[in-house]
Amino acid sequence: MANLYTVLSDRFLVNPSRIALKTPDNTWTYQQLHNLVGQMANWLDTLALAPGARVAVQVEKTPQALALYLATVRAGFVYLPLNTAYRESEIAYFLDNAKPAVFVCDTNHFVWAQPLSMQSGVAHTATLDASGQGSLMTAIDTCESDYSDANSRDDDLAAILYTSGTTGRSKGAMLTHSNLISNAQTLNDYWGWQSDDVLLHMLPIFHIHGLFVACHGALYAGAQMVWLPKLDVNAALKYLPSCTIMMGVPTYYVRLLAETAFDRELTQKMRLFVSGSAPLLIDTFQAFEQRMGQAILERYGMSETGMLTSNPYQTESEQRIGSTVGKPLPGVDVRVVDDNQNTCVADQVGHIQVKGPNVFVGYWEMPEKTREEFTADGWFKTGDLGRWGGKTAQGQSIPANYLSIVGRSKDLIISGGFNVYPKEIETIIDDMTGVLESAVIGLPHADFGEAVVAVVVAQPDVAIDTEQLQQQLKRTLANYKVPKEIHLVQALPRNAMGKVQKNLLREQFSR
Ligand code: AMP
């Protein structure tokens, strides 16, 4: 294989005049994007960085930000995207931990980012703002656009993605050129990408979903991206008629379904809606299918591994099944094992472990942690609990080669010595009249070790009687699984990728 950028550009430069990006006020052809990437790569070379130097970036989503990512990879350096929500003290951790040579920050953050860079020994700090301007753009102005791609080896690092780290400090997952190339190629084939596809891109690009899954898909196909800075329902409704693919976290679909204008006619050209990064509620899956006449394709993956499983793209002989994440992608091995590493039978919940060319090489400067997270025979422990087959909450049989995610193993509740899987209880509560959604957590309990606690969001204008809810659950569930407390909240706390932040709920409700 080769440099990731070489692989991508060999494909998209087949038609350089094709539109790569369409923003609300501009369009960029692939040639223009390629030229900008070349200028930025030349600028990086003027800095005389050491091989493998990290380029940390915390900027808003613009075409220039995408070019900066591509330029870093093209020049053989390591891209380190940072969530735009991170504050000064959080950024201090990443700069200290990753020791980047370059930090590109938002112009508005320069006042604190510059001193922070100095403190952390970052040699070069530049700015880029939400309109694509900043000292970075001034610096590259005189740089040539012609550039020879770095001759990267398969196992050279292309990016470090820090995990969202809801427990302990965030860890930097090191991804190689070949990790990213293999996942891009697999998904391109599996999801049937074509050069005439138009992707509605509203995801952030500091995360694997928006940066790799979505961008690599379009770039590898030489397809167009409608490039919106963030989820914007009105803009989505405006652009959807010309789009063929959309990728989103579950919240995006909830928000779109709340609009009556979001219907089959508006989305006539759409051939694929993908959801991931957090569980898609069965209600959303069903409401979508009913309204749109096609099912959302739910897939599963993580920063450390890229995409692992997907519901089928071709639906002539197979079905997309709500509440499952589908089958292992070609070339990816997935197994579910019990605490003693024995293979689980169908419907038995166990630990999800994975292997494949897409799996990362380890955590940045954490050899011990890396060793812990891999089995002796080389499988990565995802930390997710899952099961093959089984039945949906509606009683539909799930084929034995379909995986369902039951939750994170650290969210597993052990109450009175019994294992309680939050997802099982959440699924039942979510199905109850008047409930919009729920999160089940374990809180310290003097007798049971941990007590099961449910946090519930009611549907708009519905009053829920928590005692009645508890009584109903008693009739359905073994006693040890019945929440000892049920709390009503207006909304569940979620991060930018739509994941429920159970750590915050545990903090809020533990006394
Ligand atoms: P991240 O590294 O931020 O992408 O987070 C990866 C984690 O998100 C996985 O380990 C899962 O716990 C969760 N996740 C990703 N996709 C799904 C999905 N379709 N359903 C449920 N959880 C998911």
Image (tube, rainbow, N blue to C red):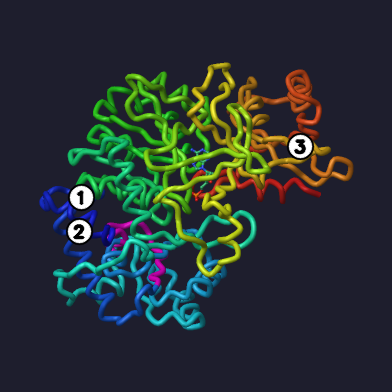
Which of the two residues, 436 or 233, is positioned nearer the viewer here? 436
Q: In the rendered view, does 218 fall on the left or right side of 98?
A: left
What residue do we see at 40% from left, 82% from top? 123
Pointer 1 with pointer 2, Cβ within 8 A? yes
x, y percent for residue 143: 18, 75
Kindly state the secondary structure of the residue where label 1 is placed.
Answer: strand
Q: Which residue is mark 3?
A: 452
- Give the Cα distance between marks 1 and 3: 49 Å
x, y percent for residue 437: 60, 31
Q: In the rendered view, does 305 fall on the left or right side of 241?
A: right
The residue carrying mark 3 has its beta carbon less than 8 Å from ligand 1: no
Q: Earlier in the sequence, mark 2 or mark 3?
A: 2
Given the image, on which type of amino acid does mark 2 rest?
A: Leu
Number of marks in picture: 3
What residue do we see at 68% from left, 30% from top? 425
Q: Which residue is mark 2?
A: 33
Does residue 174 belong to the magenta stretch? Answer: no
Given the image, on which type of amino acid does mark 3 rest?
A: Val
User: Magenta residues?
Assistant: 54-69
Using the rendered view, name the quadrant where residue 259 is placed: top left
